[in-house]
Amino acid sequence: MPSLDQSQTPYADALDVYAQRDVLRLNVPGHNARRDVADRLVEYFGQEVVNRDVPPLLPGIDSGEENPLTRARELAADAWGAHATWFLTNGASQANRLAALAIAQFGGANSSVIAQRSAHSSFIDGLILSGLSPRWVLPTVDAHHGINHGISVDDFRRAVEENPDACGAYIISPSYFGAVADIEGIAAVAHDAGMPLIVDGAWGAHFGFHPNVPENPLALGADVLVSSTHKLGGSLTQSAMIHVGNGPFADRLTDILNRTLPLTQSTSYSSLLLASLDIARSALATGHAAIERSIASAESLRVAVREHPRLAVVSDGFDRFSDIVGHDPLHVSIDVSGLGRTGLEVRNTLMTEFHIELEIATDTCVVAIVGPGHEIDSARLIAALTNLVKDSGSTETSESHSLPPVGRAAMQPRDAFFAPSEIVDAAHAVGRVSADTLAAYPPGIPNVMPGEVISAEVLEFLAYTAAQRGGYVRGALTPAVDTFRVVI
Ligand SMILES: Cc1ncc(COP(=O)(O)O)c(C=O)c1O
């Protein structure tokens, strides 16, 4: 429970006071907050927004001891129960790169990290930047819905036993579809082995702020929590946070993150994004009733989906997966295969014809994200979905095509990324070492990492997935995935 007055927004307030003062601005940003310098900007965003766009290190805002930005970060740490919190202006992507660079300092050059194979691309960037060597753990896969979930405690423990020299671990919870992993169990195994646990909680910024949403990972033992605050935390796009938990590595991680943050952050961080983080934190921490309304609203959508003869709730089947111990009520995952259309088709048609935007789509399902506080118009969505029913019945899925085995790691990701490379066609790629990351969607697990040997099975899987309705390969040089960047 927070102990500070969470209704306060010290940074946003200080910015507001500054913006309302009569200041002759002769510094950057060069719009100088003046209509005569930037009339289109002022007209578009409004004078207030432009006035609040200020440079860093202003006395009374973010410079000096105990300034409003420091206080805003303390309030955020208090709200999330963290040892320390940093505000970021380049998304949870920045947090993942930062986390990888931090963990590498636990093990020194060329150390290894245990990581969920479906790691977000920004964590893979972190591996390339840090030189860490990944020891992968495969998540569970729901082939019918084309989605992957998390990793189980048993699989994690096995990976720790096989890699006693690993200096840290990285998992994702919740998944893109709202599935929650057993963080308490995984953190206990990591701590017994003397390693810190990073939880990429990009999709769960609201966790812990209401008894009916899952617990915040820091309260369950996570040492580093990556939070994409702009996703479900209510701040502006690209604003994010990274938190250090109160566990055994708190002081060391805090020192490391203080030292490492400048490697990843602009020296001209956006005051607008920082203010949005301050306001979003206060709204979450004081917004119990609003969150409750959105939970009830998301539940009413799930009820309507269950009652619909052609739709189903994907999370109703989560109990089939050993790694899933809960799910986020604000992620509403809907199986639309009964409509006779693919999830992608449904998502695109809803957007273009019905002006309804959904977050994610796979071959068979779509996911609606309900922002904390949002009471959604379920009837409008259900009516639009009903309009999309095709008489032909359910769509076929590509479930029979199982994931190919991960290729042998011939080089470290960093070495392969920086090595001289060439582009070859598929026939000449087999047996060569990839310089790129390739991930076939669905389900989005990287099939090839920099440094891994490309196998004929992987090539076949990538080409097959790319040819499916809605299938694509992230990182591929061409949509048909017929050329590859390989190490010379
Ligand atoms: C699991 C995960 N981690 C990190 C990120 C990166 O977040 P951001 O868009 O805030 O950079 C994403 C984005 O979708 C994600 O899904």
Image: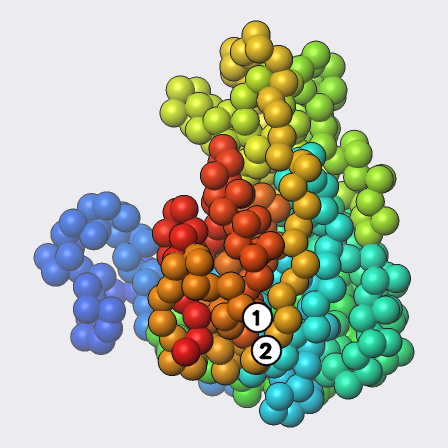
In this figure, which residue is indicated by the disc labeled 2?
410
The amino acid sitting under disc 2 is Ala
**Mark 2 surroundings: few (<14), some (14-19) or many (≥20) residues within 10 A:** some
Return the residue nearer the eye: 364 or 334. 364
In the image, residue 75 sits, relative to residue 374, either above or below, namely below
Q: Earlier in the sequence, mark 2 or mark 1?
A: 2
Image check: 349 left or right of 146?
A: left
In the image, residue 466 sits, relative to residue 411, either above or below, namely above
Quadrant in which residue 366 is drawn:
top right
Please tell me which residue is depicted at 73% across the width and 55% down the height of the picture.
139
Return the residue nearer the eye: 147 or 458. 458
Please tell me which residue is depicted at 44% across the width and 23% down the height of the picture.
349
Which label is found at residue 452? 1
Q: Quadrant of the C terminus?
A: bottom left
Please tell me which residue is depicted at 28% across the width and 48% down the height of the picture.
45
Q: Compute the Cα span from label 2 to label 1.
A: 6 Å
Quadrant in which residue 360 is drawn:
top right
| Image coloring type | rainbow
Return the residue nearer the eye: 297 or 349. 349
The percent coordinates of residue 279 (x first, y second) are: 53, 55
Residue found at the very far front of the displayed protein: 427
The amino acid sitting under disc 1 is Glu
Is the Cβ of the residue at disc 2 closer than 8 Å to that at disc 1?
A: yes
The percent coordinates of residue 475 (x first, y second) are: 45, 58
User: Would residue 29 be seen by someone viewing this image from the given angle?
Assistant: yes
In the image, residue 72 sits, relative to residue 40, either above or below, namely below
Q: Note whether ligand 1 is within 8 Å of mark 2.
A: no
The percent coordinates of residue 303 (x first, y second) are: 74, 21
The percent coordinates of residue 450 (x first, y second) are: 52, 71
